[in-house]
Image: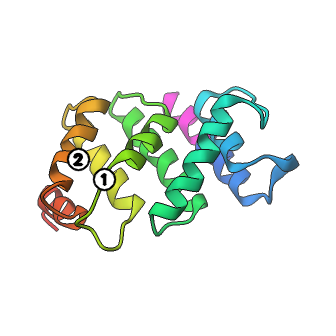
Amino acid sequence: MKTVGNAFYLLLFMSLLNLSNVQGQSLGCKMATVDTKKYYTETDPLVKRYNNMFNQLDVKYLETKDQIADMTVTAKNELENIGLSEPMINIMEGICRLTDTKTKSKRYSENVSCYIIFRSQGFNHSDTLKKMQDLLAIMSMESIIKSLTGK
């Protein structure tokens, strides 16, 4: 039953993204609604946090805001599939805070993949971000992903 619920919210989110600015809702408003399953207005502090994160991540990474949203929802679903829960805003803010001077073309997809891998290995949210930051101090994200996946 949980899988059906997750699939429903993923489909709901995907349909919201594909509709052009539904009733004037920002991407941040849609994400807050999907994440907490509650209704939000544009003035809500959580919506403002999401919108702020999208603006920052859009500048920092190659992917678009819509792609970042999709990947973050996927990450949340992957975590739920292994019995973990993390608010999407925490994932986004944590990845945004990482300092990466070794990677030339920064991809949110690589960072969120690394995040999921470490979480699946038993690290909590804070420890995952610390581990990622420690590795980014000595190698590029591409090298981290290669060492974790063998690809």
Q: Residues within 10 Å of mark 2 (few under 14, many from 20)?
A: some
Instruction: Name the chief secondary structure element in magenta.
Output: helix
Relative to 105, is 79 above or below? above
Query: Which stretch is magenta?
Result: 1-9
How does the figure colour the protein chain or chains? rainbow
Answer whether residue 4 is magenta in the image. Answer: yes
Relative vertical location of residue 103 with respect to residue 9 in this rendering, above or below:
below
Looking at the image, residue 103 lies above or below residue 53: below
What mark, if any, has residue 133 been given in the picture?
A: 2
**Left or right position of 86 against 14:** left
Residue on which the image places disc 1: 99
Q: Nearer the viewer, residue 140 or 4?
A: 140
> Is the C terminus in the top left, top right, bottom left or bottom right quadrant?
bottom left
| Residue 41 spot, x, y in % from top left | 79, 33
Residue 24 placed where, x, y %? 85, 49
Which residue occupies 20% across, 55% down? 136
Name the residue nearer the viewer: 55 or 78.
55
Residue 10 appears at what percent x and percent y? 59, 45
Of pointers 2 and 1, the one earlier in the residue sequence: 1
Percent position (x, y) of residue 39? 75, 29
Residue drawn at x 20%, y 31% as measured from the top left:
122
Q: Determine the image quadrant of residue 64.
A: bottom right
- The crowding category of the residue bearing disc 1, from other C-alpha atoms within 10 Å (few below 14, some 14 to 19, many at least 20), is few
Q: Amino acid at mark 1?
A: Thr
Magenta stretch: residue 91 in it?
no
> Looking at this rendering, what residue extends furthest in the bottom direction?
104
Q: Residue at x 53, y 54 (%)?
A: 56
Question: Mark 2–mark 1 contact, CB under 8 Å?
Answer: yes
**SS category of the residue bearing label 1:** loop
